[in-house]
Amino acid sequence: MDCGGNGIPVTVVVGNRGALPLTNIPVRYRLDNGPWVNEVVQGTFSSNSGATHTFAQPLTGLAAGTHVLLVETNYPGDQVPADNGGDLNFQVAPSLLVQAPYSEGVEAGATVPN
């Protein structure tokens, strides 16, 4: 399941709760113990500021069942490392679409409506 072939975007909010400015915050995510997807949130973040970041690589090919998404950052010299990550447990329901053979006959003398 991937929302029409485009995947599901992964969006995070990063912020600076420390006293010193931060520049170019590294962020990453992984799904179900798969490989990490790494990116950098560009910019300089003063104390008590932040930004929303959407990863370039969306989640794709999700099978029905339970999944775990982990998101974290590891900024060198972070003054508050206890708030560097989070996880999301979610369910993907089986598809309700049935791809059955379909045919439609056209009877002799049928007309196309106006």
Image (cartoon, grey):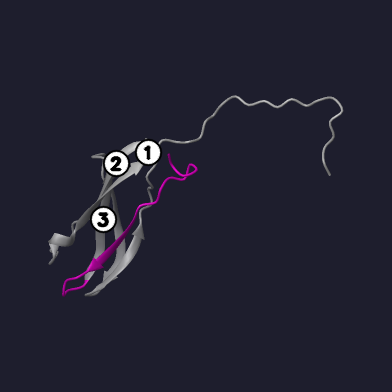
Element carrying mark 3: strand
- Single out the mark in the foreground, 1 or 3: 1
Q: Report whether residue 76 is seen.
A: no
The residue type indicated by label 2 comes to: His
Q: In this view of the protein, which residue sits in the foreground, 76 or 64?
A: 64
User: Badges 2 and 1: C-beta atoms under 8 Å apart?
Assistant: yes
Label 3, label 2: how far apart the Cα atoms are: 20 Å
Q: Identify the mark nearer the N-term, 2 or 1.
A: 1
On screen, residue 105 versus residue 24, left or right, reads right
Callout 3: few (<14), some (14-19), or many (20+) C-alpha neighbours within 10 Å?
many
- Residue type at mark 1? Leu
Which residue position holds label 2?
Answer: 67
Residue 79 screen position, x and y as percent: 12, 67
Residue stretch in magenta: 1-21
Q: Nearer the viewer, mark 3 or mark 2?
A: 2
**Residue 49, magenta (yes or no):** no
Q: Which residue is mark 1?
A: 62
- What amino acid is at disc 3? Val
Q: Nearer the viewer, residue 4 or 77?
A: 4
Mark 1 vs mark 3, CA separation in Å: 22 Å
Image point 13% across, 60% down: which residue? 82
- Label located before the other in sequence (1 or 3): 3
**Residue at left 21%, top 56%?**
85
* SS for callout 1: loop
| Position of residue 34 measured from the top left corner of the image (x, y, whole percent) | 26, 39
Which corner quadrant of the image does residue 50 belong to? bottom left
Is residue 24 or residue 32 the one in the foreground?
Answer: 32
Q: Is residue 80 above or below residue 107?
A: below
